[in-house]
Image (cartoon, rainbow, N blue to C red):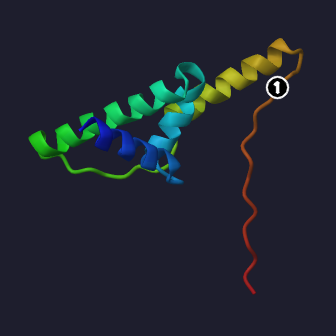
C-alpha cells in the first residue's frame, strides 16, 4: 500500500493541471521533497478513503484558484510593496473585446 501511494503521489505531482501538483509546489519549500511527496500521498489516501467509505464523488479541481486565496495573496503582495516604499493603487484590468470580422 505504501509503495502504491508513493507511486500515485509521484505521478500526480508530475501531471500538469493537477490539484496535487499545486499542493506539492506549495508544500515543497517548507517540507522538502520527501515529506511533500508523503503529504500528497496522505491526501490521496484520505481521498480514496472518503470515496470508498462515504460514497463521495471525486471531482478533479485542476489549477482553479480559490477566490479567498487569490484575495489573501493580493493583500500580501500589496503589503510587501508598501514595505519596500511603493505606493500601490489596484485597478482591475479590463479585457479587450475582440472586434467581429
User: Which one is nearer the viewer's eye here, 9 or 58?
Assistant: 9
Position of 23 relative to 96 (above/below): above
Residue 34: x, y in percent? 48, 28
| Picture coordinates of residue 39, whole percent (x, y) | 40, 28
Vertical comparison of 66 with 11: above or below: above
| The furthest residue to the right | 85
When asked about the image quadrant of residue 45, the answer is top left
Residue 99 in sight? yes
Identify which residue is drawn at 44% across, 49% down.
11
Q: Quadrant of the C terminus?
A: bottom right
Q: Which residue sits at x=54%, y=29%?
A: 33
Split into 4 quadrants, where in the image is the N terminus?
top left
In this picture, residue 27 sits left or right of residue 91 = left
Q: Which residue is mark 1?
A: 88
Residue 63 screen position, x and y as percent: 51, 48
Name the image quarter holding residue 54. Answer: top left
SS assignment at label 1 = loop
Work out whether residue 66 can be spotted: no
Left or right of 84, for residue 56: left
Give the residue at x 63% y 28%.
73
Q: Is residue 80 above or below residue 15?
A: above
Amino acid at each position: 500500500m505504501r509503495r502504491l501511494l508513493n507511486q500515485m503521489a509521484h505521478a500526480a505531482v508530475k501531471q500538469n493541471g493537477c490539484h496535487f501538483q499545486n499542493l506539492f509546489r506549495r508544500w515543497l519549500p517548507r517540507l522538502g521533497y520527501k515529506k511533500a511527496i508523503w503529504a500528497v500521498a496522505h491526501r490521496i489516501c484520505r481521498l480514496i478513503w472518503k470515496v470508498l467509505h462515504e460514497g463521495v464523488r471525486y471531482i478533479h479541481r485542476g489549477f482553479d484558484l480559490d477566490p479567498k486565496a487569490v484575495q489573501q495573496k493580493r493583500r500580501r503582495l500589496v503589503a510587501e510593496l508598501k514595505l519596500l516604499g511603493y505606493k500601490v493603487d489596484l485597478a482591475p484590468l479590463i479585457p479587450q473585446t475582440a472586434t467581429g470580422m
